[in-house]
Structure formats: structure tokens, C-alpha cells
Image (cartoon, rainbow, N blue to C red):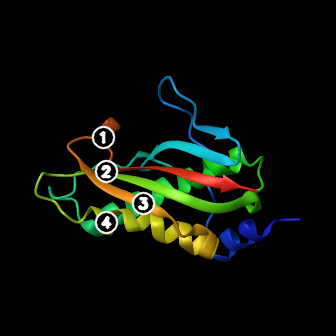
Amino acid sequence: MAGKIDGRLKELGIELPPAPAPAANYVPFVITDSLVFVAGQISMDETGPICGRLGDGYSVEQGRAAARSCALNLLAQLREACDGDLDRIRQVVRLGGFVNCTPDFVDQPAVVNGASDLIVEVFGDRGRHARTAVGCGALPLGVAVEVDGIVRLD
């Protein structure tokens, strides 16, 4: 029987991608006590990395969509960390958002809302989290956004 969160994903028309494999010498998540630390998830879809630079021909709406893709990949990693049972997530504690942007771009929070909004949409109050949204001069593979997270499990 599918759990509540699986049902919510289905209701939202969301099918999680497979959890992306690490691209270097790290693990995709670490569980310590009741916390899961999820490594940075880059903006990526079924066709590959979503690249772009905010403030340089890449819109806030495109950035928000890229951040949402990061959140989908983060959820896929959490599904692995929870042995397939996303109902074990008690609280999304924190998201860190990194935006590939020009030095004068100042709408990082609006971009990272793409990830935050999805997490709250899926988990409700358990998805409300602390967050950072910072600008970077470059991100791996030239992607537009990267998001990491800390989650508390039951």
C-alpha cells in the first residue's frame, strides 16, 4: 500500500526520477542519528543537466524550474535514504540553494523558491524549512541551480 507522501506525489502528478549517482568522490546522503544530510543535487532532468546563468539571458522563471528539478532529485535521494518510505520524513529542516548568476543578480530567493515551494507542496507543514539562497559565479557542469538539504526522520 502506498504511503501518504506517495499518494500526495501521485495527486500532484509527480513521478520522482531515479536517484542520481554521485559525480565524484562523495556519497549522495549520510544518515546520522535521526538526520539525513543530502548532498547537493544539481538542476537536471531526463535529458541531462539544466544549464544557464541567471542575469545572463536566463530568467527567474527558468531558474525556478531548475530549482524545482533539484528538489525532485533531492526527494529521490530521500526515498533511497528512507528505504522507499517517504512517510518516515518527520521534518525538512533546511535547504541550501546555490544559484549560478552574474554578480549583479539579486533574485536568488525567488529562484530557490522553486525548490522550497515543491517541498512544502509535498510535505505540508513538515516541509517548512530554514533556508539559504546564495549566488555563485559558477556551478558544476554549468548548471543553473544546486540544492542540498537536511531532513529529520522518524
Query: Residue 92 in the image: x percent, y percent?
Result: 58, 61
Q: Pick the residue in front: 149 or 17.
A: 149
Callout 3: helix, strand or loop?
strand
| Residue wearing tag 4 | 109
Tell me how far mark 2 sits from mark 4, CA to CA: 14 Å
Query: Residue 143 in the image: x percent, y percent?
Result: 33, 45
Query: Residue 13 in the image: x percent, y percent?
Result: 62, 72
Crowding near pointer 4: few (<14 within 10 Å), some, many (20+)?
some
Callout 1: helix, strand or loop?
loop
Which quadrant: the C terminus?
Answer: bottom right
The part of the image, by quadrant, that contains residue 60 is bottom left
Q: Residue at x 65, y 55 (%)?
A: 152
Residue kind at label 4, given as amino acid type = Pro
Tell me how far mark 4 sits from mark 1, CA to CA: 17 Å
Task: Please report whichever mark, 3 or 4, sits nearer to the chain's N-terminal start.
Answer: 4
- Circles 3 and 4 in contact, beta carbons < 8 Å: no
The residue at the far right in this view is: 1
- Circles 2 and 1 in contact, beta carbons < 8 Å: yes
Callout 2: helix, strand or loop?
loop
Query: Residue 146 in the image: x percent, y percent?
Result: 39, 48
Task: Please report whichever mark, 1 or 3, sits nearer to the chain's N-terminal start.
Answer: 3
Q: Residue at x 58, y 68 (%)?
A: 127
| Residue wearing tag 2 | 144
| Residue 139 tag number | 1
Crowding near pointer 2: few (<14 within 10 Å), some, many (20+)?
many
Q: Is residue 33 left or right of residue 143?
A: right
| Number of numbered discs | 4
Task: Please report whichever mark, 2 or 1, sits nearer to the chain's N-terminal start.
Answer: 1
| Residue 131 tag number | 3
- Circles 4 and 1 in contact, beta carbons < 8 Å: no
Which quadrant: the N terminus?
Answer: bottom right
